[in-house]
């Protein structure tokens, strides 16, 4: 998979590219799954409320808002209700994702899919990169809206301008890094900087705290600690920067940023999906873009590939639900909720991952681009 420049949608959005795949159908037949059922019908669909399932994080809610804002342009009077659900990956905040993935449970989707198949919700808004390439029987995935930023980024900590030796010592990597480390429960009980209510206050660092000047991974000294819970990111960092140490960091974006900024955790930086920061209004925390360039490839350092579907918003619905399907279609002169080129691009990436039989326990990355010739071909 050769790296390529970031995708920039241009011409025709009407003719699909030729995508070939020998992969199996995009449907998983689990041994124990609730059977698909038709949703309850209201006396009149015009009075029916669209029940939208999602995870409860600030990013998940932000992505629901993106979806509903698109939907409102097509159906201004459609009532919607957001139904936040705690999923398996959110409930277990200590076990590393690689270990959790080996249980066979879909960490970010399965609990929501049970409600969808029971008819208790009408659709689910996902971060597309978290959705398995094989969905459960009775469900299907749509890619909705425009795709956000695909690349990963590096975030460095905000550090207090203090000479307190106790603080300085907690950031070194020669002693006990965990001695002053607060628990996850303590971290989660503090205000989340990614919450919309806090961002509206335009919180800025105090006079004794400043954002570290822009730096790069290549500037970090030996044994510096890089935080990530992704084995894909870990594999690429280890290959490209073997002098750095990788340490697992779990939690939503707000939790990870608090752990980064707390010297007791000892992180020198963390790696995040840039689109998550941008959708929460935290783009100013981005210090470096992990974007492969020709010179890096020539040196054999390897490309910093992003996750399949990263930046995309997935909408999971029941197969055959004509009401929800109809809501997604554009009216005359309007663009529908599903954007063809974005959908084809993400489907191509997911087809590749499915063919490789990859998932969150396999370090697979991708770089996808359009060759805008007369055939509108797509390569990854």
Image (cartoon, rainbow, N blue to C red):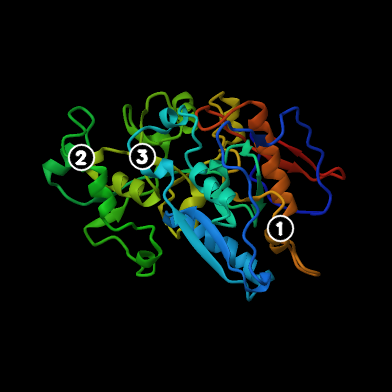
Relative horizontal placement of residue 100, taking residue 329 as reference (left or right): left
Q: Give above or below for 168 relative to 329.
A: above
Question: Which class describes the residues within 10 Å of circle 2: few (<14), some (14-19), or many (20+)?
Answer: some
The residue identified by callout 3 is 92
User: In terms of sequence position, does the residue under pointer 2 or pointer 1 come before the other?
Assistant: 2
Q: Residue at x 50, y 28 (%)?
A: 361
Relative horizontal placement of residue 29, taking residue 162 as reference (left or right): right
Q: Residue at x 32, y 36 (%)?
A: 94
* Residue 84 found in image quarter: bottom left
Q: Residue at x 68, y 36 (%)?
A: 26
The residue identified by callout 1 is 325
Give the x, y percent position of residue 296: 56, 31
Label 3 and label 2: CA atoms lie apart by: 19 Å
Q: Give above or below for 82 relative to 233.
A: below
Quadrant for the C terminus in the image: top right
Residue 283 seen by the camera: no
The residue identified by callout 2 is 181
The residue lying toward the viewer, choosing from 38 and 359, is 38
Task: Give yes or no for contact between labels 3 and 2 (Cβ–Cβ under 8 Å).
Answer: no
Q: How many marks?
A: 3
User: In terms of sequence position, does the residue under pointer 3 or pointer 2 come before the other?
Assistant: 3
Label 3 and label 1: CA atoms lie apart by: 34 Å
Give the x, y percent position of residue 138: 66, 44
Secondary structure type for disc 1: helix
């Amino acid at each position: 998979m050769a790296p390529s420049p970031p995708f920039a949608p241009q011409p025709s959005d009407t003719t699909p590219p030729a995508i070939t795949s020998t992969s199996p159908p995009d449907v998983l037949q689990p041994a124990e799954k609730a059977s698909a059922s038709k949703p309850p019908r209201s006396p009149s669909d015009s009075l029916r409320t669209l029940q939208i399932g999602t995870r409860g994080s600030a990013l998940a809610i932000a992505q629901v808002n993106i979806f509903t804002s698109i939907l409102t342009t097509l159906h201004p009077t459609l009532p919607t209700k957001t139904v936040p659900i705690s999923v398996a990956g959110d409930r277990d905040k200590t076990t590393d994702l690689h270990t959790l993935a080996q249980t066979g449970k879909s960490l970010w989707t399965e609990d929501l899919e049970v409600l969808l198949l029971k008819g208790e919700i009408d659709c689910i808004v996902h971060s597309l990169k978290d959705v398995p390439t094989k969905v459960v029987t009775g469900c299907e995935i749509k890619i909705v809206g425009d795709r956000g930023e695909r690349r990963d980024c590096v975030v460095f900590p905000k550090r207090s301008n203090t000479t307190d030796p106790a603080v300085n010592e907690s950031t070194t990597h020669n002693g006990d890094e965990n001695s002053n480390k607060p628990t996850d429960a303590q971290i989660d009980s503090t205000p989340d900087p990614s919450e919309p209510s806090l961002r509206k206050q335009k919180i800025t660092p105090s006079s004794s705290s400043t954002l570290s000047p822009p730096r790069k991974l290549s500037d970090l000294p030996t044994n510096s600690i890089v935080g990530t819970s992704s084995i894909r990111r870990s594999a690429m960092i280890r290959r490209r920067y073997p002098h750095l140490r990788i340490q697992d960091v779990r939690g939503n974006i707000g939790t990870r940023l608090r752990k980064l900024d707390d010297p007791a955790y000892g992180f020198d930086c963390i790696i995040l999906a840039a689109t998550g920061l941008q959708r929460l209004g935290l783009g100013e925390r981005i210090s470096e873009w992990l974007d492969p360039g020709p010179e890096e490839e020539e040196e054999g350092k390897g490309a910093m590939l992003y996750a399949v579907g990263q930046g995309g918003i997935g909408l999971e619905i029941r197969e055959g639900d004509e009401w929800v399907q109809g809501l997604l279609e554009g009216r005359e002169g309007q663009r529908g909720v599903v954007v063809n080129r974005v959908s084809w691009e993400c489907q191509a990436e997911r087809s590749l991952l499915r063919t490789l039989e990859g998932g969150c326990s396999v370090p697979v990355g991708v770089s996808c681009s359009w060759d805008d010739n007369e055939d509108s071909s797509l390569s990854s």
